[in-house]
Every structure is written in structure tokens, then in C-alpha cells.
Image (cartoon, rainbow, N blue to C red):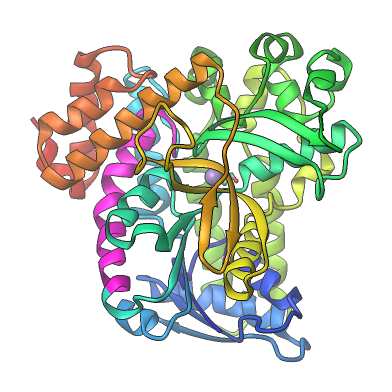
Amino acid sequence: MRLTILGGGGFRVPLVYGALLRDRGEGRITSVTLHDVDAGRLAAVGRVLADQAAGVPDAPAVTATTDLDEALRGADFVFSAIRVGGLAGRAADERVALAEGVLGQETVGAGGIAYGLRTVPVATEIARRVAALAPDAWVINFTNPAGLVTEAMGCVLGDRVIGICDSPVGLARRVARTLGADPGTARVEYAGLNHLGWLTGLYVAGRDRLPRLLGDPGLLGSFEEGRLFGAEWLASLGAIPNEYLHYYYFNRETVDAYRSARHTRGAFLRDQQAGFYTEVGGAGEPGPGAASAAWHRTLAEREATYMAANRDAAGVGDRDEEDLESGGYEKVALALMRAIAHDEKATLILNVRNRGTLPVLDDDAVVEVVCAVDANGARPLATGALPGHAAGLVTAVKAVERAVLAAADSGARADAVKAFALHPLVDSVAVARRLVDGYAAAHPGLAHLGG
Ligand code: G6P
Ligand code: MN
């Protein structure tokens, strides 16, 4: 089995490779092709992977290329985890929005729209190359904003592209543990869009245990989402929101926290990652284990500071120790790949076409819901109705995503203005127009949208 990773010079590639190394199962991935537009980043990550593989018998062979077509030919699975415009682009997405007093975040609000506008054309072109060169491959999309990008790629690849995110599985794990349930066997009800979902039930032996949690402020205060949102608000909601909903429910506070922070998340990561790639990718071969040690150190710092501004805004302390080990997106990816490759039935929360699961959206809208996976791919499972206000937010944000897809397709300024103006976290059409001007000035690829 051959896996191609697009964005192969990305910082989180060693997480995926580590999961492959631990997979001793029949029919596992035996060869990995890394593709990236930046040869220097490929070389640095290659050094980390070589450290990881040292001494492991039958470690998957690794090759690297900057030629997309060469990377795609013969692939059984394609992971897409690219970052158009790099972390400097992410920092600019944040900066332009915050200058207008609205949220600038990688995937949420104005920042997410700008990132989507930059990414959709590239992801669509990748999908076309996959369709031409590896039509039988399954594409697993990690590229953010993951729901929107999966929908764009799905216009070319249909159900052959599946989007993944680790935040729902992390949330479900924390809720299960808090209730003393086994995260591996509890049945979870979770639905929405990527980074805009709610856990509405957690069943053990056929009984929903969520009401017990919602009725116990002590238990609610004992895990990440409970602390972030506060027990009282979660009890009012009657569901546990994905952590990214903190940007909605506490919008003013998170915008203030981002504006007053020394650096935004994107700016912090831009500088931190530059340090890592310089250290590991520089001239001269690092000694055995040195690349991997630098990577672990950088990862630990990255995990510890995840959503730090939100935790500051909420007045809560550090993350729990057990949440610091990576969120597990590589585990979701591996579980998905195994279920498809071996027809091993699995239940996973994934980004797929709706097909009636959320009645407020059309069948082709990509949603993030619980799915049954086997050799035929991922099929969304029926789920309970979302609370009314959640259905409203999902509908509003899907309308924004559709406007982003239209703007990426037409290149028209009016379509881009519409995407920003419709977003619940952008409070005026006049602001939306200035945002489009700001992004057109900040990103050469969006210059055509300027007024
Ligand atoms: C979560 C999200 C991902 C995101 C990751 C890293 O796991 O679900 O979509 O890529 O966090 O966020 P960071 O701010 O550290 O880049
Ligand atoms: Mn995610």
C-alpha cells in the first residue's frame, strides 16, 4: 500500500509516520511519498522520519519529491495537509481581521474566509490531478478550513475525498473519561460542520449519560471544554460544543485576547516553526536523534500553547496533561485508512456529504457527523436533531462556505464581499468591504478582489 502525503514537509507529518510505524497489521502502508513545494522543508522532515525509523524493522520506505504528478501516480491513499501561503499567510489572515475589530483565526470568522479563498483554488487543482492520475485513490483531507476544502475537492472527486479533524474525537474522549466511560466503546452523538459541532449525547449500554454531566457543575468544571465555556453556559445549552465555538459564544473576549496578546497564534507559529526548520534543515547532517529531539521539543511547546488566548480569556489555567499528547488526528487518519483498505467496520466522526443527515442542509453540503466506514467509504449515520440555535448557526456558516466557493470560482469582488458580510462574526457589510481590501493588499493571490 502506498500513501502520498501532500504538504509532506509539514510539521505534523512525523505524527502520521509514527502511527504508521506502530501499525504492525496485515496490509499496512509500506511506502510513503512526501510531496511539498518546498524542498528544504521536505529535507528537514525527512531527517525526523529517518530518526523515527532507525531500528524499526520493516519501517515504511520514504521518498520525497516536489513534482505533484510524480507523487500522485500509483498512490492508494492521498493525505492532503497543505498550507497555502504558509504560516506568514495565516498571520496575515489574523492581522487584517483584528485590525477591523473582528476575529482573525485560522478557520473561524474572517480569517477562515480569507484562508478558504486562498486555499480552494489550489485544493481544486490538486483534486483534478488526483482524478487524472490516481482515480482509484482515496483522498483524506486535513487541509483547513477542512469542511470547506473537502466540499471543494468533492466537487471533483465526489465521495472519494473524506475530511478529518481531531477535535471531535478529542472532545468525545474527554467527555467519556469525565463520565468514567470507556472512550473506545461509548456511542457518541455529534453533529455540525467542521469546528462548528456539538456533542449532544454519549451512550453507554444504551443509556445517554450526557444529562448526568450537564447536571453536575463539579464534573463540568473538570475538563477542557467545561472550563472554557463554564458549567452554567453548558447546562443552558444542553450540549457540549466543540472548543472552536468559544470564538462564537465568547467572541468579544477572544477578539480582545487576540488583539492584546503579544502575538497571534499564526505569528507565534510562524516564528516557532521557522526556528525548527532552520535548526533541522540547515547545512550539515545532525547527529542521530537530533532532528527528532528538536521536533519533539517544538511539538510539546506547540501543544502546550494551543488555544492559549482562549484559555486566558476564560481565566482558566493550563491544559490537562493527558490533552497535551497530540490530539490524535493521525489516529483518525489511520483508523479511516484501515477501515477502507481492509473493510474493517469503524465508526468515526468525519467530514462527508450530508445526504439528509442534517435536514437543514442540502444533500451535497459537507457536514461533520458520525459515519460508518468500510471498503465502500464513509456513510453518515442518522443523528438526533441539532438544537435550534445550532441548526441556525450551521445554516448561516454553510451559506458563507458556499459564498467562498462561489468567490473562489468567479474571482468576483462582490462574491467575496458577500462571503465576509454573511458571516455571523462580521458585523457590517462596510467591514466586509474593508476586509476584502485588506486581504487583497496582504495576499498577492487575492489582489484581484481589491476595490
Ligand atoms: C486542532 C484543530 C486542527 C488544527 C490543530 C492545530 O487539532 O482541529 O484543525 O490544525 O488544532 O492548531 P494550531 O493552532 O496549533 O495550528
Ligand atoms: Mn480541525
Q: Is residue 379 above or below residue 200?
A: below
Of residues 160 and 235, the one drawn nearer to the viewer in this rendering? 160
Q: Is residue 153 magenta?
A: no
Q: Residue at x 71, y 17 (%)?
A: 315
Q: Is residue 318 above or below residue 62?
A: above
Q: Is residue 415 above or below residue 299?
A: above
Q: Quadrant of ligand 2?
A: top right
Residue numbers of the magenta segment: 107-131
Q: Is residue 127 magenta?
A: yes
Image spot of residue 371 (x, y percent): 58, 49
Of residues 23 and 154, the one drawn nearer to the viewer in this rendering? 154
Q: Residue at x 71, y 58 (%)?
A: 297
Q: Is residue 48 above or below residue 420?
A: below
On-image quarter of the C terminus: top left
Image spot of residue 366 (x, y percent): 41, 43
Of residues 17 and 93, the one drawn nearer to the viewer in this rendering? 17
Image spot of residue 207 (x, y percent): 83, 30
Q: Is residue 221 visible?
A: no
The quadrant holding residue 412 is: top left
Q: Residue at x 68, y 54 (%)?
A: 328
Horizontal relation, residue 66 to residue 303: left or right: left
Q: Residue lying at the far right in this picture: please name it.
A: 180
Image spot of residue 83 (x, y percent): 40, 55
Q: Main secondary structure of the magenta part?
A: helix
Horizontal relation, residue 123 to residue 287: left or right: left
On-image quarter of the N terminus: bottom right
Q: Is residue 152 visible?
A: yes
How many numbered marks does the figure carry? 0
The quadrant holding residue 60 is: bottom right
